[in-house]
Amino acid sequence: MFEIIIQAIWLMIPAYIANPMAVVLGGGRPIDLGKNWIDGHRILGDGKTIRGLIGGTLCGIFAGVIQIIVSKEFEIFTVPTLIVVITLSFGALFGDIVKSFFKRRIGFIRGAQLPLIDQLDFVIGAWVLTYIFEPQWFIQNFNIELIITVLILTPVLHRLTNIIGYRFKLKKEPW
Ligand code: CTP
Ligand code: MG
C-alpha cells in the first residue's frame, strides 16, 4: 500500500511538478493570443499562457532529469527515459490545455470549476503522450494498480496544493 503510493508519486513527478509550476510561472501572453473560436468564445482563455506552458514543461523535465540521475544511482527506483520525462511534463500541460479548449466550447468561463476533470486532465494528458511515444515503458511501469492509485491520489494532492496556492495568492480560486 505504502510502496505503491511512493511508486505512483515517483512515476508522476514530472507531471506533478509541471502542472503547479505552470501556475507559479504563468502569466503574460495567452497561448490563444486572445483570439476567439468560431463560437465567439475564447479558444483557450487567459488562464493558459505561453510562459506557464514553457516554464511548467521545463521544470517538469528538470525534475525528471534529476530522477534519471538518482534512479541510476539507487537501483530501487524505476528509471524514466528522457522521452518519458518530456512526455509526462509536456503531456500534463497539453492535457490541461485540451481540457480548457473543451471547457470554453461548452461555455464555461476561465476559472469555472469542472470537478474531477480539472484534477485529472493533466494526468490523462501525461499518460496519453507517454503511451504514444514510449508504449513499452508505459505498459511496463503503469500497471492497473498504479493507474488506480494515481487516479485516487491525484485529486487529493491536487486539492491540497491548490488550497496552498490559493492561500499564497498564486491562484484565483481554491481549486
Ligand atoms: N497557467 C498558465 N499557463 C498554463 C496553465 C496555467 O499561465 N498553461 C496559470 C494561469 O494563471 C491560470 C492558473 O495557472 O489562471 C491556474 O490554472 P488552471 O486552473 O489550469 O486555469 P484556469 O484559470 O482555471 O482556466 P480554465 O478555466 O481554462 O481551466
Ligand atoms: Mg482552474
Image (tube, rainbow, N blue to C red):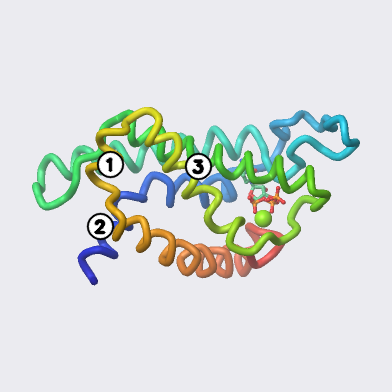
Mark 3 residue crowding within 10 angstroms, few (<14) / some (14–19) / many (20+) = many
Q: Nearer the viewer, residue 127 or 154?
A: 127
Query: Which part of the image, by quadrant, shows the N terminus?
Result: bottom left
The answer as to whether callout 1 falls within 8 Å of ligand 1 is no
The residue drawn where x is 57% and y is 50% is: 24
Q: Residue at x 79, y 43 (%)?
A: 105
Q: Amino acid at mark 3?
A: Gly
Q: CA distance from mark 2 to mark 1?
A: 15 Å
In the image, residue 81 above or below residue 102: above
* Element marked by disc 3: helix
Q: Residue at x 63, y 57 (%)?
A: 170
- Give the mark, 2 or 1, whose residue is nearer the N terminus: 2
Instruction: Provide the residue designation for mark 2.
Output: 7
User: Which of 78/64 is in front?
Assistant: 78
User: Is there CB contact under 8 Å for labels 2 and 3?
Assistant: no
Give residue 139's mark.
1
